[in-house]
Image (cartoon, helix red, strand yellow):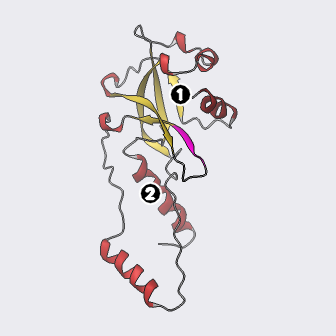
């Protein structure tokens, strides 16, 4: 995990999260954060560590459903590809497109200082912001793993960008 923090620290800052004092405006709507480590031997990046927000405890005031293509549209698309001799088909995976998308409603997260490397605690002076039980609070300003609204916000952003280029 320290390796992941070092790599994150040395990249250009994204301002996705910010360490804060205990939130005053929505103290009962604080969710948990956790590190998720996975080993994916079939991928180029075999070892992956992600900080994930506890989306099951978020009380988001708006709709969070991301619109998708109807099954009939999908069947027509695939049928047309397999029915045309020599047809070519390509898809793109933009699954991480929602990361760092601006959010309309910031979310508050807590995590135990024991889960954060000492060098990060020292650099950001987290002991000064810690609660008596050793937790630290974070505000999420941009889309990240676990936010239920991140997919919808990214979909809206993608539509806006594609519409500018003439796609519908």
Q: CA distance from mark 1 to mark 2?
A: 25 Å
Q: Secondary structure at mark 1?
A: strand
Q: Which residue is painted at 50% across and 13% down in the image?
A: 129
Which range of residues does the magenta coloring cover?
A: 45-49
Question: Residue 48: within the magenta?
Answer: yes
Q: Residue furthest front?
A: 41
Check the picture and name the quadrant holding the N terminus: top right
Q: Which residue is painted at 52% across and 58% down in the image?
A: 94
x%, y% of residue 92? 53, 65
Location of residue 66 with respect to 149 vertically, above or below: below
Q: Are marks 1 and 2 in contact (CB under 8 Å)?
A: no
Question: Residue 121: within the magenta?
Answer: no
Pointer 2: residues within 10 angstroms few (<14), some, or many (20+)? few
Camera-nearest residue between 114 and 111: 114
Q: Main secondary structure of the magenta part?
A: strand
Pointer 1: residues within 10 angstroms few (<14), some, or many (20+)? few
x%, y% of residue 139? 47, 29
**What residue is shown with label 2?**
156
């Amino acid at each position: 995990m320290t390796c992941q923090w070092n790599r994150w620290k040395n990249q250009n800052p994204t301002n996705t999260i910010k360490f804060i004092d205990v939130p005053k405006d929505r103290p009962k709507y604080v969710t948990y954060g956790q590190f998720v480590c996975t080993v994916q031997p079939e991928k180029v990046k075999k070892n992956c560590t992600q900080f994930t927000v506890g989306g099951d405890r978020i009380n988001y005031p708006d709709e969070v459903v991301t619109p998708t293509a109807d099954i009939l549209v999908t069947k027509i698309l695939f049928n047309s590809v397999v029915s045309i001799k020599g047809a070519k088909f390509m898809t793109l995976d933009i699954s991480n497109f929602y990361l760092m998308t601006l959010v309309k409603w910031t979310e508050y997260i807590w995590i135990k200082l024991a889960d954060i490397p000492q060098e990060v605690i020292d650099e950001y002076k987290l002991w000064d912001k810690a609660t008596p039980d050793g937790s630290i609070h974070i505000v999420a300003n941009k889309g990240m793993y676990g936010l239920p609204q991140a997919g919808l916000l990214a979909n809206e952003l993608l539509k806006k960008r594609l519409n500018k280029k003439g796609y519908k």
